[in-house]
Amino acid sequence: MPGLIIDGKPVDVPTGATVLEAARKLGIDIPTLCFAPGFEAGAGCMVCAVRIDGKLRPSCATVAREGMVVESETADIMSARRQAAELILRHHAGDCEAPCQTVFPTGLHIPAMLRLVAAGKFDSALELVLRETPLLSLVAEVEDAPYERACRRAQHDGAVNIGGIVKHLSARENQQGTPSAPACREKINRKALLNSPGATGLAAAYFLLREGVSCAVCGKIQELPFPGDMAREIRRLEQMGLETTVGSAPEPDVIISPPESNPAQPDNVFICREEPNLFACLRAGRKLAGEVLRYLKIDAGTFSRRRSVHLGSISPEEMAVFLKNASAEARTEFSGKTAAAEISREAKRCLHCDCRAAADCRLREVAEKLGASFSRHGDRPFAFAVRDHNPRIIYEPGKCIACGLCEKLSEKNGVTAGLCLVGRGLGIKAGMPLDDWSRLAQLAQAEEYARVCPAGALALRD
Ligand code: SF4
Ligand code: SF4
Ligand code: FES
């Protein structure tokens, strides 16, 4: 049983254990990417680097030895891990979030919405939109919306009519009579008082109510300079629990006020600025809600905007890859009488630029934790590519970090002629023997492959 010292702390581990296991025994958090428990370490990514005898070593693949002295948390080790993650991100040929989603002020998952609309699931699409979009009937009235201008399909034959689809969902809701409200968490005995809120304040209230914070309005809700059905939006907020009839809430935990009303600002008073642009208000309201939640010590993780790799400009060949599974029809403009089937057809023009693994991608999580830069300088060495022969799983070779975990999983599951590493040098990627991609269609255990892949290269379709 070798004993070693990590960051000045002694630890004993069974013979054959790795430095990573020893560190974890001490509760030291070392990130990993190309290593997964139950598989032999590949030692390829170096995000798990530690310093032993003055040299950087992969902790996942270094066996602990008696008397070893290991450093794991110095600034230079953190910098080496960060650089290792940045190198991988620079090579990553894919977007974490679609361009439209990145631009939407509250991060609405537009490609997911379009998939639901394309499948004719309008109620589910509306539910999804309402989970992230305050003041929907106002948002639906915005002409020339920036999220539509950002649409990648605009580079080919016209942006997807996302604005028209949002408008259609809003109109459908209107026809139902009663506004729908998103699911809200159980009330948590925390109260916010909003002084004369405008769009920013109401957006903040929307997110706070969703997270279970009680909200009451003091004074009048401001007249908003944006078109839309405000009465519907107030009814929606009331359905979520907003109290609009009280003059003040008894002992609020937090007060949200316009700047002029609070010259002296105690800790629990949050200044709420109304912006001249609706989307700027929604963005500011969401940010404010996150700050209030943090102040109230409520988990505000979902309010932090996640970082994203962006493909940037794409080549005509890459556009052809995107277009392969999208409808070839030209953009359709809608009128109030446009049939639902036509709306679904327009949604099928979406190129699905998003990464299906974005929510639980280990690469993204590790890179964020290490403070790595997600921006790419210079050219991308790998083109965006998709292998979609399998009904359950998509493979994007440009995201593969050649960790070999999928190959090891195939070996473990006794799958012959499954995914395996092919190529040379930097170009090594998971591939199919003899380049026979039709075999990918037979790949079973899709969930296991998607789970084991650390970089979103293998991801479930839905
Ligand atoms: S093609 Fe679809 S996913 Fe891509 S930017 Fe346009 S709407 Fe978003
Ligand atoms: S596709 Fe295979 S080799 Fe490539 S990153 Fe994913 S698990 Fe690793
Ligand atoms: S080298 Fe250890 S996790 Fe990649």
Image (spheres, rainbow, N blue to C red):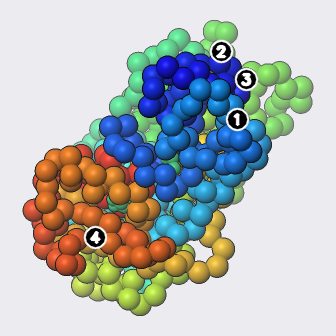
Tell which tag, 1 or 2, sits nearer the viewer: 1
Q: CA distance from mark 1 to mark 3?
A: 8 Å
- Identify the mark nearer the N-term, 4 or 1: 1
Question: The disc labelled 4 sits on which kind of residue?
Answer: Gly
User: Left or right: where does residue 449 sit relative to residue 228?
Assistant: left
Q: SS at mark 1?
A: strand
Q: Foreground: 59 or 163?
A: 59
Q: SS at mark 2?
A: loop
Q: Are marks 4 and 2 in contact (CB under 8 Å)?
A: no
Q: CA distance from mark 4 to mark 2?
A: 59 Å
- Identify the mark nearer the N-term, 4 or 3: 3
Q: CA distance from mark 4 to mark 3?
A: 44 Å
**Residue 8: assigned label:** 3
Question: The disc labelled 2 sits on which kind of residue?
Answer: Pro
| Vertical placement of residue 46 versus 232, above or below | below
**Residue 252: assigned label:** 2
| Vertical placement of residue 358 versus 323, above or below | above
Tell me the crowding category of disc 3: few under 14, some 14 to 19, or many 20 or more residues within 10 angstroms, Cα based: few
Report the residue marked by disc 1.
71
**Residue 431: assigned label:** 4
| Vertical placement of residue 210 versus 332, above or below | above
Tell which tag, 4 or 1, sits nearer the viewer: 1
Kindly identify the residue that appears in the image at 77 percent across and 43 percent down.
75
